[in-house]
């Protein structure tokens, strides 16, 4: 070998102490291993967070505070203890089942959050599935059908994903417990002691939510009891339907105190007690006071009180059914069962007493067989009213148009009988983002006038929009009486329910205002013993009745003697 030739490179295997860098493949393998370890730890952490969040997630929106998640769920400790006691395969099976059930509990909690936010009550596992169609319709009417479909698909996928993810998370965490059995056993035992001490002391970070938590167990118990009650309620309601003191009263003995009068019963959407008592809505009682003065100047008098509605935030049909049937209809099971009976409604009473009975429901856009149950000879759905103007959020037409069209078709024509009508007014329906303004009654025609820049300013604030919409409908009714009312006009207008908790806040009452307006003093003299207050603004001392008592009180007050018939069970 020539001395000028370069020396051979040292062999890394023969010189283990060489500082030469390892091959690239070994560097990549090490980095990959570290990456996998980090990813595994991140996934495990996320699994633990998911399980703890689903266990501590409140089911009431007003409890959604950071402190609500700083609780120790007893269910998690008991499940961990069970998993530690089980061998491999049974442990994984139990973890998967428990995780899936935990996911279902989380879905129920989310359902409760939504229903408390919109209807002021928890999700009914037996009856509320039918409301999903109503919810879809509401969203479609508010933002359009494509957006509603996208939201529905997203919600559906999320509801399916939650139980799967919680099951996978529980299985992963069960493996962690098994790999560190000694340490986790000590940790679980220590946390059980801590939980017992906290429970005994009653430590709370969020009011009504103890740090020593059993929320998931309580939730399951409450919903299980509700399911049991719903199954029993069918027979209870059937017995109530069968007792009716007015079912067999002859027509010539019904409503004698209203002979010759046109009686309009108007349900005002979301018109609740808060509208006349909440200081933020002070303009509404002022409007009512001014309206009472204007009606008095036109020769009309008015009386007001409160009714307790069976629903809140929505499900208006339950309130309609309760007031008109004289039965407490607070869920869809009772509603469906009621429609399958021949219960004697206020519409039936007027019809038997020779009134022409009419139903006007602008928000109904398809066949509505319920009209026959309520005793209506003539029913007007939204399409029947012939409106050609713009929509206003959920409302397909302004209330003024619906009332005007009813008047022109039923009261402004030759007729041989007085009219009794139910008017379901919907301009004050959520989301309260676009509110009409009153127009001249002579300019209404087919509704095109509402396109001409004479509408209320859209608002994104729920409480502001709510106040504007209630004021609009009240102005419509008062203006109608001023314009078209006469000695034979009797107007009863009532709220169907309080608005959603986004307006009222948590735990609102179910009370709604009710008013009777008439020019003939003999009409209001019939209800002197009701104790209702003069005018249109009931205060805190005004009488409060359950809404299901109204039918019997009304038929009794306007009957021939003012005495109530004796109930005759079937």
Image (cartoon, rainbow, N blue to C red):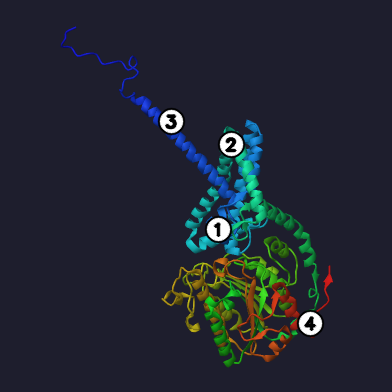
Can you tell which of label 3 and label 2 is closer to the viewer?
2
Q: Position of residue 493 (x, y in %)?
A: 62, 79
Secondary element type, mark 3: helix
Residue at the disc numbered 3: 33
Residue at the disc numbered 4: 253
Q: Is residue 330 above or below residue 274?
A: above
Secondary element type, mark 2: helix
Work out how far the residue at label 2 is from the one at label 1, CA to CA, in angstroms.
Answer: 33 Å
In the picture, the disc for residue 77 is none
Point 37% across, 25% down: residue = 26
Work out how far the residue at label 3 is from the one at label 1, CA to CA, in angstroms.
Answer: 40 Å
In the picture, the disc for residue 183 is 2
- Point out the tag, 2 or 1, that comes first from the N-terminus: 1
Can you tell which of label 1 and label 4 is closer to the viewer?
1
Q: Is residue 209 above or below residue 398?
A: above
Point 57% across, 90% down: residue = 293
Work out how far the residue at label 4 is from the one at label 3, CA to CA, in angstroms.
Answer: 91 Å
Can you tell which of label 2 and label 1 is closer to the viewer?
2
Q: Position of residue 77 (x, y in %)?
A: 63, 44
Point 65% across, 46% down: residue = 193
Left or right for 374, reference 472: right
Q: In the rendered view of the protein, which quadrant contains the N terminus?
A: top left
- Point out the tag, 4 or 3, that comes first from the N-terminus: 3
């Amino acid at each position: 070998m020539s001395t000028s030739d370069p020396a051979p490179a040292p062999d890394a295997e023969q010189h283990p102490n060489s500082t030469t860098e390892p091959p690239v493949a070994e560097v990549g393998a090490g980095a990959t291993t570290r990456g996998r370890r980090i990813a595994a730890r991140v996934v495990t952490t996320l699994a633990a967070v998911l399980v703890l969040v689903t266990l501590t997630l409140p089911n009431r929106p007003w409890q959604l505070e950071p402190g609500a998640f700083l609780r120790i769920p007893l269910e998690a400790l008991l499940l961990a203890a069970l998993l530690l006691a089980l061998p491999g395969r049974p442990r994984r099976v139990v973890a998967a089942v428990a995780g899936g059930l935990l996911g279902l509990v989380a879905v129920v909690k989310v359902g409760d959050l939504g229903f408390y936010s919109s209807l002021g009550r928890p999700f009914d596992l037996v009856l509320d599935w039918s409301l999903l169609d109503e919810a879809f319709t509401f969203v479609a009417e508010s933002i359009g059908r494509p957006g509603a479909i996208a939201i529905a698909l997203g919600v559906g996928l999320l509801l399916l994903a939650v139980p799967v993810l919680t099951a996978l998370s529980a299985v992963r965490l069960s493996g962690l417990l098994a790999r560190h059995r000694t340490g986790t056993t000590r940790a679980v035992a220590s946390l059980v002691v801590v939980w017992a001490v906290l429970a005994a002391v009653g430590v709370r970070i969020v009011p009504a939510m103890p740090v020593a938590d059993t929320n998931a167990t309580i939730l399951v118990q409450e919903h299980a009891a509700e399911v049991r009650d719903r199954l029993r309620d069918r027979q209870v309601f059937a017995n109530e339907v069968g007792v009716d003191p007015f079912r067999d009263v002859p027509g010539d003995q019904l409503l004698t105190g209203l002979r010759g009068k046109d009686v309009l019963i108007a349900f005002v959407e979301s018109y609740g007690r808060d509208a006349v008592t909440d200081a933020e809505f002070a303009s509404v009682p002022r409007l009512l006071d001014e309206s009472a003065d204007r009606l008095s100047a036109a020769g009309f008098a008015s009386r007001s009180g409160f009714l307790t509605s069976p629903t809140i935030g929505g499900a208006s049909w339950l309130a309609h059914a309760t007031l008109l049937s004289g039965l407490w209809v607070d869920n869809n099971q009772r509603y469906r069962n009621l429609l399958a009976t021949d219960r004697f409604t206020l519409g039936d009473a007027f019809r038997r007493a020779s009134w022409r009975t009419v139903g006007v429901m602008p928000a109904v856009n398809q066949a509505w067989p319920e009209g026959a149950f309520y005793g209506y000879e003539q029913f007007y759905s939204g399409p029947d009213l012939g409106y050609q103007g713009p929509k206003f959020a959920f409302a397909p037409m302004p209330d003024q148009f619906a009332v005007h069209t009813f008047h022109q078709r039923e009261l402004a024509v030759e007729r041989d009988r007085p009219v009794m009508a139910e008017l379901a007014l919907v301009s004050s329906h959520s989301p309260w983002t676009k509110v009409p303004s009153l127009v001249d009654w002579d300019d209404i025609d087919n509704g095109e006038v509402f396109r001409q820049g004479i509408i209320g300013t859209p608002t994104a604030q729920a409480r502001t929009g709510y106040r504007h919409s209630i004021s609009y409908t009240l102005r419509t009714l008062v203006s109608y009486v001023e314009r078209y009312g006469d000695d034979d006009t009797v107007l009863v207008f009532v709220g169907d329910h309080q608005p959603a908790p986004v307006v009222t806040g948590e735990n609102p009452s179910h009370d709604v205002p009710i008013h009777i307006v008439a020019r003939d003093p003999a009409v209001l003299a019939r209800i002197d013993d009701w104790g209702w207050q003069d005018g249109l603004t009931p205060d805190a001392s005004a009488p409060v009745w359950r809404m299901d008592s109204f039918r019997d009180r009304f038929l009794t007050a306007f009957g021939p003697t003012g005495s109530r018939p004796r109930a005759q069970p079937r």
